Image (tube, rainbow, N blue to C red):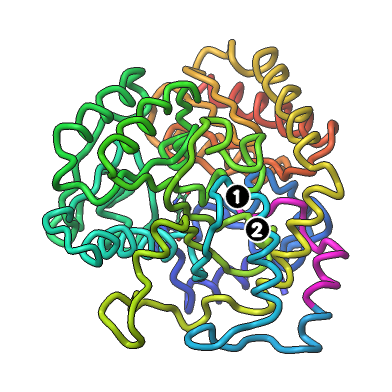
Amino acid sequence: MMSKDWIDRDVARVWHGFTQMATYADNEPVIVERAEGHYLIGTDGRRYLDAISSLWVTTLGHRVPELDAALIEQLGRVAHSTLLGNGSKVVIEFAEALGEVVPIPDPHFMFASDGAAAVEQALKIAFQYWTNQGVRGRTSYLAFGGAYHGDTVGSLSLGADGFGSAIFDPLRFPVLRAPGFDASDCMAIAADMIRTDSERLAAVVVEPYVQGAAGVKIHDPAGFKVLQQACDETGVLLICDEVATGFGRTGTMFASQRCELTPDIMTLGKGITGGYLPMSVTVSNRKVHDAFLGEDLSEKTLYHGHSYGGNALAAAIALRHLRLLSEWSVLDNVAKRSAQLQQLLSEKVSLLSIVRDVRVAGLMCGVELEEKHKRGRRVCATAVRSGVLLRPLGDVIVIVPLLTSTEEEIETIVDVLADAISQEEGH
Ligand SMILES: *Cc1c(COP(=O)(O)O)cnc(C)c1O
């Protein structure tokens, strides 16, 4: 069947996220049929280099034999059993392995399926952490301008305006809002706000090092220290949302490490299973976890849990994936390819007349163009036609290559992008 037929069938039954369905078909969507390594293959038989890591979730590539094998092996045991009140062997093994690498000593892991759900869990945990100790009034959160933490109502409340969130203002609860990463003094301002309002703050929520969905906005890692200090002084919990930055994406295993942050709570998702299965997790330190200990069935219990939290198939893949990250020295490759990407972009892209800014953090990159209606969309469409799958965030072309990208693939991505932007310059 031709790709056109698949698009018609798609439109007839599937509602795509963040997508205007009235115009979806006009934007030449790729209908993926299968994948080979770093390439997605459409129903039209064309191959597309995955330069967005399937929206930031895929790490090592598609159809990684080792991950496929881990999945099949786990299928021979059990696919899923609930974590509510009972345990799962492979989840324990994964939690132990993850506990060795997260920047939180003596961590406890509460699993869910999506990043937004991990953020919701973090919000509820931070809130109840205080009520369990009889502290009243610590019911607010501090978040940053430009922040993105997911699309459920709680995570949307933490997030900044934009991304269509303002429509939901009547549902969003208010938060204290520090400036975004564009303001170089945003951390100092946030620290002041924490000290001034600590009595009503349950927690601060921040994307360490990089605000991804804001268009890859990078903040000097050294600047985060004042945030940690303000939290330490006031007891306000520090929640680091590493759904996007975790698992090597920005060059260190976790961005908190680069920023020298020791969060009380951390959220992970996206790359946790290498892009294979939905899994997310809220990580709590000992202090937070132990504030929920009490009598059986007592009010100190965290009454929260998702049906598929701690899915065994996802845990088996996540465990194998975590080991592959070190077995394959993936972080070394991220460092090399990131330096190469930065170099090539400054040679071939930065000087193009409509390019306003180029920002690179590990293998997460934003190329910001001068504003023009649908410009980002046109540039990406041109790249897709040339076989490189890109997707814009407004006027920012977001490049998120696979962590195992080769030298040649990075060259291809930059060449195709430079060409696509040059074509747009005449527009
Ligand atoms: C993507 C993202 C989320 C939401 O994750 P979903 O799995 O899409 O719900 C939350 N926080 C950050 C920083 C993200 O980039």
Q: Residue at x 47, y 24 (%)?
A: 369
Q: Residue at x 34, y 64 (%)?
A: 291
- Across and down, in percent, residue 326 comes to 80, 48
Label number found at residue 98: 2
Residue 158 is covered by the magenta coloring: no
The outermost residue toward the front is: 295
Looking at the picture, does residue 328 appear above or below residue 350?
below
- Across and down, in percent, residue 421 comes to 59, 25
Q: Residue at x 45, y 48 (%)?
A: 241
Label number found at residue 73: none
Residue 65 is covered by the magenta coloring: yes
Whether pointer 1 and pointer 2 mark residues with C-beta atoms closer than 8 Å, the reply is yes
Q: Is residue 81 left or right of residue 155?
A: right
Q: Residue at x 36, y 23 (%)?
A: 182
In the image, the segment drawn in magenta is: 57-71
Amino acid beneath label 1: Val
Using a 10 Å C-alpha cutoff, classify the residue at mark 2 as few (fewer than 14 neighbours), some (14 to 19) or many (20 or more). Answer: some
Amino acid beneath label 2: Leu
- Across and down, in percent, residue 144 comes to 30, 37
Under circle 2, the secondary element is helix
Question: What residue does disc 1 label?
Answer: 102
Would you identify the image quadrant in which residue 382 lies?
top right
Looking at the picture, does residue 7 appear above or below residue 260?
below
Q: Quadrant of the N terminus?
A: bottom right
Would you identify the image quadrant in which residue 172 lies?
bottom left
Tell which of 4 and 359 is nearer to you.
359
Q: CA distance from mark 1 to mark 2?
A: 6 Å
Tell which of 3 and 210 is nearer to you.
210
